[in-house]
Amino acid sequence: MLPQKKYYRQRAHSNPIADHCIEYPRCPDEMNWNDLYICDNLEDESKESNKKIVVEFADIGCGYGGLLVTLAPKFPETFMLGIEIRVKVSDYVMDRIKALRTQNPGTYGNIACIRSNAMKYLPNYFNKGQLKKMFFLYPDPHFKKAKHKWRIINSSLLAEYAYVLCEGGLVYTVTDVEDLHEWMVKHFTEHPLFEKVRGKEMEGDPVIDVLLDCSEEGKKVSRNNGQKFLAAFKRVADPFAV
């Protein structure tokens, strides 16, 4: 039986600047991914060494896990991680994944969720150029100008996202707040390591069709007949690299 969201509800957003009691690895090599994923196809020796598990998709602020659950069967060979700062919400996603694995043996072993603060600890989990896709779906808009520095997309954090993304890797953003959409597009396009993916370039991308409505927030916006703004950005080569 799947967990019920009513038992996991809490505030819609959490202050990313506040001190949270979060455990995190000192470096990516210290992260034991075997505790999070099911790899039935790996040999016992490989399981123990932890060398075969390489997370390639990261859903930042994954909410109740809608994107992870949607993408899991579409990319069965890809390990995906959801990062959520809210305690009860991350607990729900973890319990949801466990229940789905029980109900569907042999599936959903490629997705997992951790409670962490991506604005502070992202490089502690991922090596340079490790990720192929990152997702920022309906992030906190932090409407007040004084809190714009708390937005998950800002000039300093883009350098970290560029670090963990491989060349050619993609970042996807979705929001129902036009001002935030324009903010994110502006910051990505002004950064030398990202370029905006134009309309025709998105054709054939298997994740595009599910991004708008896979999350709880996306479904809520649809029920309220709200607008949605989607953008994608490609990690390009460093023009200053030697």
Image (spheres, grey):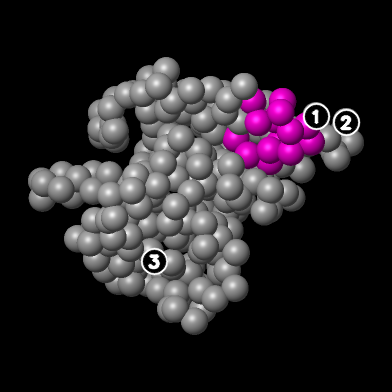
Where disc 2 sits, the SS reads helix
Numbered circle sitting on residue 48: 1
What amino acid is at disc 3? Answer: Ala
Residue at 36% across, 23% down: 9
| Quadrant assignment for the N terminus | top right
Are the residues flagged by discs 3 and 1 in contact, CB closer than 8 Å?
no
Q: Residues under labels 1 and 2: Cα distance? A: 6 Å
Q: Position of residue 25 (x, y in %)?
A: 53, 30
Is residue 229 in view from this perspective? yes
- Which tag, 3 or 2, sits closer to the chain's start? 2
The one of 175 and 236 positioned closer to us in this rendering: 175
Where disc 1 sits, the SS reads helix
Numbered circle sitting on residue 44: 2
Rendered position, 85 above or below 73: above
Residue 102 shown in magenta: yes
Residue, disc 3: 231
Are the residues flagged by discs 1 and 2 in contact, CB closer than 8 Å?
yes
At label 3, counting other C-alpha atoms closer than 10 Å, the crowd grade (few under 14, some 14-19, many 20 or more) is: some
73 sits left or right of 23 in the view: right
Is residue 152 in view from this perspective? no
Q: Quadrant of residue 147?
A: top left
Q: Residues under labels 3 and 1: Cα distance? A: 39 Å
Q: Position of residue 106 (x, y in %)?
A: 79, 36
